[in-house]
Image (tube, rainbow, N blue to C red):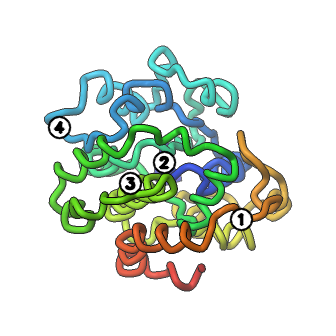
Amino acid sequence: MAEQLVFIFGFDRSGTTALARVLAAHPDTELLMQPFNSSEFRQRMYDILNNENVSATQRQFIEGLTKGVIDTAYISSPWFFKYSTTETWKTGQLHIVKSTISHFLLPWLVCEFPMTGVWGIWRQPVDVIDSIFRNNFQGWYAGAIPCLKETVKSCNQLRQSFPDESFDGLSAVGEVAMNFAIRSFHLFQHLPTGNVIWYDEFCRSPNVAVERFRERFGLRQVDVAHLANRDLNMTGRKRNAHTACLTARDVAEIQRITEPAIELMESRHGKFRQHN
């Protein structure tokens, strides 16, 4: 295998857990599930990290991972200890770090550790927001809008795509959609072109969806199709067992807010319309 460490990023309810657990079923991989939750990374999840503001402990933890050291003393996430396949480094295995809170970590990570793999999973925004509200998870984003405004102010590219007036008159659904839009825009803007797994394709044909990932890391071909119909969520309802809870007005607001992210996916990664 070319590398022994890869990060998989995505928004909540985008299929990150299902993808990570399918990949972790491969005999040559290990899963590190949400090691950044309940840590300094979570407390600073809306900070765009760089060499000037990253803390010594944050840098030390990431550097440790790139050198084959998992500092469990730094990790306090119950998800990590319950769902990871290992708590110690396994020589010769590809270690997959799954995170839904580290969108603003990516540029610094890519710059400082260029040999580390970084991938993302994309799911249609309306489906993501619907799943969040259907499961009553919208409280996860309470109070985030002021933080997001400061994040946008600190980044020229975000300011251009999300001007001050885009925050005006947001509904509760709109606030979550804005969270998705800004974080996803930043993530996929800095993600290497093509390092995307499309959620709907993953649901239809997981073997096809993960083929490029498998080839990139030199993983043996293993059939994972039998996992497609299993509920691989750690929390929340199974993806197909629901009726949409959003109104037409909600959908229109989500589409308007997330349009910059959708346009970015089309221009940079090229397959958004094809997979929706």
> Is tag 1's residue or tag 3's residue first in the polypeptide sequence?
3
Helix, strand, or loop for circle 3? Answer: helix
Q: Nearer the viewer, residue 24 or 2?
A: 24
Mark 1 or mark 4: which is in front?
Answer: 1
The location of residue 65, given as percent across then percent down, is 43, 32
Residue on which disc 4 sits: 51
Amino acid type at image mark 1: Ala
Residue on which disc 3 sits: 183
Residue on which disc 1 sits: 244
Residue found at x 40% / y 74%? 259
Q: Nearer the viewer, residue 62 or 98?
A: 98
Amino acid type at image mark 3: Arg
**Residue at the extreme top of the image, as rendered:** 73
Dot 1, how many residues are within 10 Å of its Cα: few (below 14), some (14-19), or many (20+)?
A: few
> Is tag 1's residue or tag 4's residue first in the polypeptide sequence?
4
Q: Please give left or right for residue 115 compared with residue 245 in the image.
A: left
Alpha carbon distance from label 4 to label 2: 21 Å
Alpha carbon distance from label 2 to label 3: 20 Å
Alpha carbon distance from label 1 to label 4: 43 Å
Amino acid type at image mark 2: Val
Helix, strand, or loop for circle 1? Answer: loop
> Is tag 2's residue or tag 3's residue first in the polypeptide sequence?
2
Is residue 27 visible in the rendered structure shown here?
no
Residue found at x 17% / y 51%? 153
> Is tag 1's residue or tag 2's residue first in the polypeptide sequence?
2
Mark 3 or mark 4: which is in front?
Answer: 3
Mark 2 or mark 3: which is in front?
Answer: 3
> Is tag 3's residue or tag 4's residue first in the polypeptide sequence?
4
Q: Is residue 34 above or below residue 145?
A: above
Residue found at x 72% / y 44%? 236
Alpha carbon distance from label 1 to label 2: 34 Å
Q: Which mark is residue 6?
A: 2
